[in-house]
Amino acid sequence: MTARRGSMRHAIRLACPPDLVWDLVGAPERLPEWWLGIESCVIEGDTRTITTRSGLPMPERLLTIDHNLRRFQYRITVPMFAEHLSTIDVHDLHDGTCLVVYSVDAEPAVLALVISGAARAALNHLPEQLGVEQVR
Amino acid sequence: MGRKILFVTTDQQRYDTLTCNGGALSRTPVIDGLAAEGVRYERNHPQSVVCMPSRSTIVTGQHPTTHGVFMNGVPLPADAPSVVEVLRASGYRTALVGKAHFEPYFDPFLRFEENALSAEGTTPHGGHRRGFEHLETAAHGAMGPLHYSQWLIKNHPEALGMYCRAVDDTLQVSSEPGGDTGAPQVKVNPIDRGIYHTDWVADRVIAWLDSIDADEDWFCWMSFPDPHHPWDPPESEVGRVDWREVPLPAGYPEDRATREAIIDGKPRHWRAWYDGTLVSNYEAPAEWVPATLTTDQVREVNARNAVEVELIDEALGRVLARVAERGWGDDVDIVFTSDHGELQGDFGLLFKGPYHVDALMRLPLVWRPAPSSRQGAGTAPSVVTRPVGLIDLAPTFCTIAGIEPPEWMQGKPLPVDDGDALTRGFDKVLTEWDSELFGVDVHLRTMMRDRWVVTAYLPGTSHDGTEGELYDLVDDPLQQVNRWDDPDMRPLRDDLVADLWDSQPEARAERLVLEAPV
């Protein structure tokens, strides 16, 4: 059977220290700077509400902002999602580069694909946004 | 002044739905008339049996392995080669009206220009996209942010809820029963015919043609979303075909045991889908079990499909009348085809998937060359029986426009008769399938050559790479007897499989990525 719950992952390796990336992706209010297609982003307490370019409001609950692990986690709380967890990890590869990993688990599974596809585009936008090279 | 090109596609239309191809349910006098004046192809195959890869093949003239759009949800890169850009660069005015689907539909962030454009107009950023100067989009019903949906919202908001809901609350293709028989993706649609998407596409094509100067050359892709499910044509038209009177398709053995025995002779994912234990792709309702399909549901789906085909034929007739009024009638080449087929009851199945049989692979194709062209004047109406593919369309358009097809195109200009096809080596056509969806992957490579269709399976979730299908289209036109494991066929099978692998196209250097379900 097709899975009800979907799990997806995308990553990009960048030629820069991890903190440079973390300063951007670990700051919830800076999401529109690197995630394409966001019209607005409002933070109230542990709730971040983004409005997508299509006009869809998408409230999110911020779960983890760990500066030591460089881990950011959030849940989309739109009723359309029975379950959602997105995780952004920035790994130091100790060679002057870092690996940025975006993982998403969602039910319905289809939404994992939709979010991860947008996340991949966002990751691919990081080199331009940060002015750094992607390492292939 | 050169030859204009009206390229007409439908979505998910079988070969046998046209009267000129032997279909008995729909009346298609307009397309039949074009076939009578031009070339009708009896073996036209897509290079993929789902929308995005197939449409990408049409526009690039390349196999899916080469252009990289291996399944629905993989966007065709904006800088992919395009025959439309070749035409535009040589002076053609260019448009696509209707279903594009080179980029995914599920796009809340409006990352893809096909989805974002409707809020801004019909002229893509930079003046064109893939060579299209004018993009005016529609899909199946009031779906997404496309132009047709936005037009409905603005002008006929009452109609938004009339269409069948294509996806359910879990964003899966809806299996909600409808119509008289409870068939999936069937709904009584009270929408006025004049605002149904088929007529809207024709209206918008006419409007675009009216914006073109009489002496300009143009290429217009008129892309009807029907007869793809949902099967929800305007209620006012449904009475054209009484489903109770519809004969069961030849490919649907009424006896359940016979149907299941046929499926059991095929690789195991056929039966697994039929029983509802495996859904390998997004294109069919995940919650619907084909084994529950009733004979009346098969009849009703076929009846509604036939109605949608008739509406397309009539809409095309309106456009051709306008072309004639503009004085272009003798100068326009008309090409009619579809992107892939529909199971439509064959083997007890509906919709589409990794099933390389005629229901999905054998497509209508008619080319009516411009009567004023030298080729048109010198080409008697004909029927081509040798294999051709959608991959041959791009170089055909170049030839019509008097342009040498670029080297990146992998097909050949369509033959005008069997002698021409024989001379220029039209002896086989390839189709491929790759899908990877939440841990389930399926990979098929298929070749039609001579009287044979051979499919080799690569290792995947349900297959170890030894499976295959081999059908004799002469003795077994319904592809009910899989001869892959027939010892008598082994030498032939080995020869066909060797040819199949030798014929595989060059793969794209960097693999593209699945970014959405569809």
Image (spheres, coloured by chain):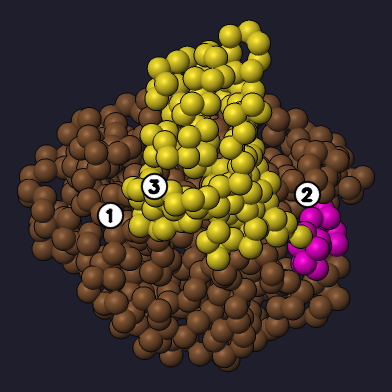
Chain colours: A yellow, B brown
Q: Amino acid at mark 3?
A: Cys
In the displayed structure, B280 sits above or below B414; it is below
Q: Secondary structure at mark 1?
A: helix
Highlighted magenta segment, given as a residue range: B263-279
What percent of the width, then of the height, locates residue B438? 70, 48
To the question of a shared chain for discs 1 and 2, the answer is yes
In 3D space, how far apart are the residues under numbered discs 1 and 2 (Cα atoms)? Answer: 44 Å
Position of B15 with respect to B277 (left or right) is left
Look at 34% across and 69% down and name the residue there: B197
Image quarter of residue B444: top right
**Marks 1 and 2: CB-CB under 8 Å?**
no
Q: Secondary structure at mark 2?
A: strand
Residue in the foreground of this view, choosing between B508 and B318: B508
Q: Amino acid at mark 2?
A: Glu
In 3D space, how far apart are the residues under numbered discs 3 and 2 (Cα atoms)? Answer: 53 Å
Residue mark closest to the camera, 1 vs 3: 3
